Amino acid sequence: MLLNGCTHGQKSKEVKIIKTGCPAVTPCYLPMNNLRQNRSLIDDNQTILTAWHQCAVQVEMIYQCQRDQHEKN
C-alpha cells in the first residue's frame, strides 16, 4: 500500500519564506590606536569618526525599520 504523498506524481511548489522584522546589526567597536607621532593622531581621529559613523548608520537603520513597523500597526 502506497501513501498518497509517496507517489512520483507532481511535485509541490517551492515555498518562499518571507521574513518580516528589522535587519540584524553587528556590535559597534572603536578601534584601538597605536600613536607614534602627531600625524598618527589625525589618522586615528579619522578612523574613530568612521567607526562611529558606521555604528550610527546601523542605529538609524533599526530606528527607521521600527518606526515603519509601528506605523503599519
Image (tube, grey):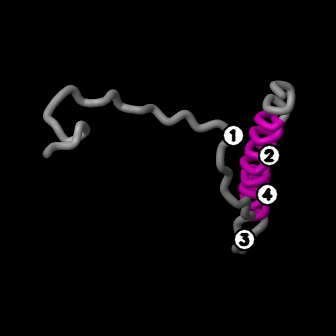
Q: What is the secondary structure assignment of the residue under circle 1?
A: loop
Q: Are marks 3 and 1 in contact (CB under 8 Å)?
A: no
Question: Dot 2 corresponds to which residue?
Answer: 59
**Which tag, 3 or 1, sits closer to the chain's start?**
1
Q: Find disc 1 in the rendering and name its residue.
A: 21
CA gap, disc 3 and disc 1: 36 Å
Q: Position of residue 2 (x, y in %)?
A: 16, 43
Characterize the local packing of mark 2: few (<14), some (14-19) or many (20 or more) Cα atoms within 10 angstroms: some
**Mark 2 belongs to which amino acid?**
Val
Q: Quadrant of residue 51?
A: bottom right
Gap in angstroms between the C-alphas marked 3 and 4:
9 Å
Task: Kindly state the secondary structure of the residue where label 3 is placed.
Answer: loop
* Residue nearest the viewer, comparing 36 with 48: 48
Q: Is residue 34 above or below residue 26?
A: below
Determine whether the residue tagged by mark 4 lies in a helix, strand or loop: helix
> Which portion, as a residue range, is magenta?
39-66
User: What amino acid type should be assigned to the residue bearing mark 1?
Assistant: Gly
